[in-house]
Image (spheres, grey):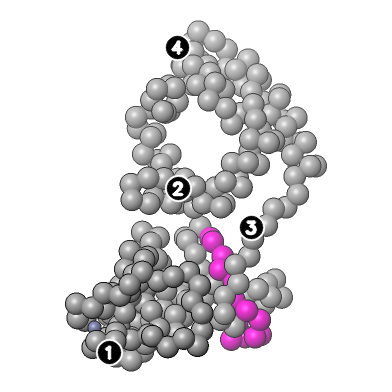
Amino acid sequence: MLEQWGIGRPSTYAPILSTIQDRDYVNKVRGFFQPTELGILVNDLLNQHFGDIVDIQFTAGMEDGLDDIAKKNRDWTSVVQNFYKPFDKDLEKAFEQVERVKLPVELTDETCPKCGKPLAIKTGRFGKFLACSGYPECKYTQSYQLKTGVKCPQCGGELVERMSKKKRPFYGCSNYPECNFATFHKPLPDPCPKCGGLLVQYLGRFPKCTKCEYKGKLKREHQDSGSPE
Ligand SMILES: [Zn+2]
Ligand SMILES: [Zn+2]
Ligand SMILES: [Zn+2]
């Protein structure tokens, strides 16, 4: 689309695509870009308050203007003035109108070791991390790692949810690097009925043993308690 609309140059395509990922505006999921909550929020705000600029025609037109300046067909002051005058007004308006937007806070079951308040999942420049929900009074943070309550099949430590470098969640042992057990599938609390090994939720749908051939049935959404199988 960038090429089709004459926006940017081949040398700028790759930096554009890596920037929107670095800033957590999109995640790459199986080769597709998926907007994040932050990305949608920022996009909506920009469209609302800077609609003239966050616009394909504007961007393509600006490229042409810059090319004209380079070829000395146009005076740079007129090009910049055309852009800056309305932009300056929009900026001033936005300063007055836009309220500080907060991303919805996602609380975890873990508590802050400093003040006892629950830890929240936050998204920063380098991906997800855990921060005390008592911020700014308490500034405790730790790397993203959520307890699953399921024991590691290799060493008996606890399995925790972490983020891979490619920002894909995975489940690893809390005793890492001493124990290197890891899986991309969500660990389940009940052990394998056949061998007692670790069960994981395979493809998000059915339990599968990590040790033997056991595969369970699709799990129903709501299971009534008290009915033994
Ligand atoms: Zn705290
Ligand atoms: Zn382990
Ligand atoms: Zn098994």
Secondary structure at numbered mark 3: loop
Secondary structure at numbered mark 4: loop
x and y percent of residue 212 in the render? 19, 81
Q: Residue furthest left?
A: 213
Question: Spatial distance from mark 1 to mark 4, Cα to Cα?
Answer: 74 Å
According to the picture, the residue beneath numbered tag 1 turns out to be: 196
Q: Is residue 210 above or below residue 49?
A: below
Secondary structure at numbered mark 1: loop
Question: Which corner quadrant holds the N terminus?
Answer: top left
According to the picture, the residue beneath numbered tag 2 turns out to be: 34
Where are the magenta residues, as a range? 112-124
User: Residue at the spot x=63%, y=15% of the render?
Assistant: 78
Amino acid identity at mark 2: Gln
Question: Spatial distance from mark 4 to mark 2, Cα to Cα?
Answer: 39 Å
Frontmost residue, 124 versus 183: 183
Q: Please tell me which of labels 1 and 3 falls first in the chain.
A: 3
Frontmost residue, 106 versus 117: 106
Q: Is mark 1 within 8 Å of ligand 3?
A: yes
Q: Please tell me which of labels 4 and 2 falls first in the chain.
A: 2
According to the picture, the residue beneath numbered tag 3 turns out to be: 103
Q: Mark 3 and mark 4 in contact (Cβ < 8 Å)?
A: no
Q: Residue furthest right?
A: 96
Q: Is residue 98 above or below residue 51?
A: below
Mark identifier at residue 71: 4
